[in-house]
Image (cartoon, rainbow, N blue to C red):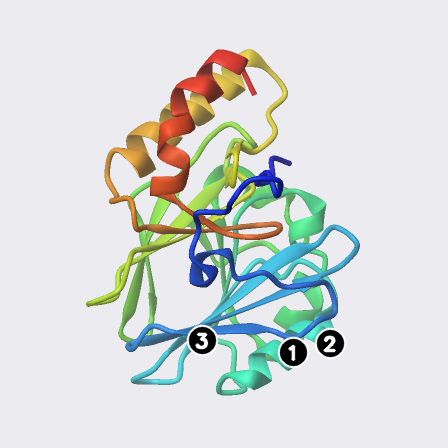
Amino acid sequence: MPTADDTHEDPRPDTARLHVEPGGPSRVVDLGAAVLRKCSVSEMDNSCYLLSCAATGEQLLVDAAADADRLAALVAEGTGALQHVVTTHRHWDHHRALPDLTARYRPTTWAGASDADELPVAPDHRLEHGDRVRVGQLELEVLALRGHTPGSIALALRVPGQPVQLFTGDSLFPGGPGKTWSADDFGQLVDDLEDRLFARYPDDTVVHPGHGDGTTLGTERPQLPQWRARGW
């Protein structure tokens, strides 16, 4: 997984990095119409994100990765209810707590259509590029980012007066795309990242990946040619 080079000055604002440690406290960002909470779980340092609608209290979790009790505590930090869970892709480390949380809260579940059959809980909704997920008065756009897995998705949240918030799963990290297993998959992923993220959203857009710290599109944009040249 690519990471930022800590030997150089980090240009990312702390509100983009949102550094958390497995088992440690959550980070909270007040976006006005929404409140975002982030925690890390498991030996894989999976980042899990709880989005709360300030107007209605409705909540959505991005990736029930592991440690159902820790994620239940994250939910309780908000309104205590969980109406939606979105799984960004089918890899096992991003859905180990999904059966427990769906049994506990009975949320509506969502996942990319091409990954849906690989999940331990069949999603209520199979998502395609351009679909929308509503959370109270909030709306997230679904962006298919093919390559890391066939059904990998990102979610884009627009809140008035705030930078766009992108939840990218394992498709984009500080320093580059997520892992792929063939040149074709890599080419597809970089094409989707360039066309569906970098060409559409401004530099202050915040990227919330599936592991580790976040970044901004402006920080990563100058590296696009380098990513293509190196092939990973």
Q: Nearer the viewer, residue 220 or 73?
A: 220
Mark 2 belongs to which amino acid?
Asp
Position of residue 56 relative to residue 59, above or below, is below
- Identify the disc placed on residue 69: 2
Q: Residue at x 65, y 78 (%)?
A: 72
Q: Which residue is mark 1?
A: 72
Instruction: Decide: few, some or many residues near mark 3? Use Cα within 10 Å; few <14, some 14-19, many ≥20.
Output: many
Q: Nearer the viewer, residue 45 or 75?
A: 45
Mark 3 belongs to which amino acid?
Gln
Quarter of the C terminus within the rendering: top right
Residue 63 visible, this angle: yes
Q: Residue at x 45, y 19 (%)?
A: 226
Q: Residue at x 57, y 50 (%)?
A: 210
Position of residue 102 relative to residue 79, above or below, is above
Where residue 166 appears, as percent x and y from the top left, is 39, 52
Quarter of the N terminus within the rendering: top right
Position of residue 190 relative to residue 44, above or below, is above
Instruction: Decide: few, some or many residues near mark 1? Use Cα within 10 Å; few <14, some 14-19, many ≥20.
Output: some
Mark 1 belongs to which amino acid?
Ala
Q: Which residue is mark 3?
A: 59
- Label pair 2/1, CB-CB below 8 angstroms: yes
Q: Secondary structure at mark 1?
A: helix
Q: Secondary structure at mark 3?
A: strand
Residue 128 visible, this angle: no
Splitting the image into 4 quarters, where does residue 231 fall?
top right
Q: Secondary structure at mark 2?
A: helix
Rounded to the nearest angstrom, the CA distance separating label 1 from label 3 is 12 Å
Rounded to the nearest angstrom, the CA distance separating label 2 from label 1 is 5 Å
Rounded to the nearest angstrom, the CA distance separating label 2 from label 3 is 17 Å
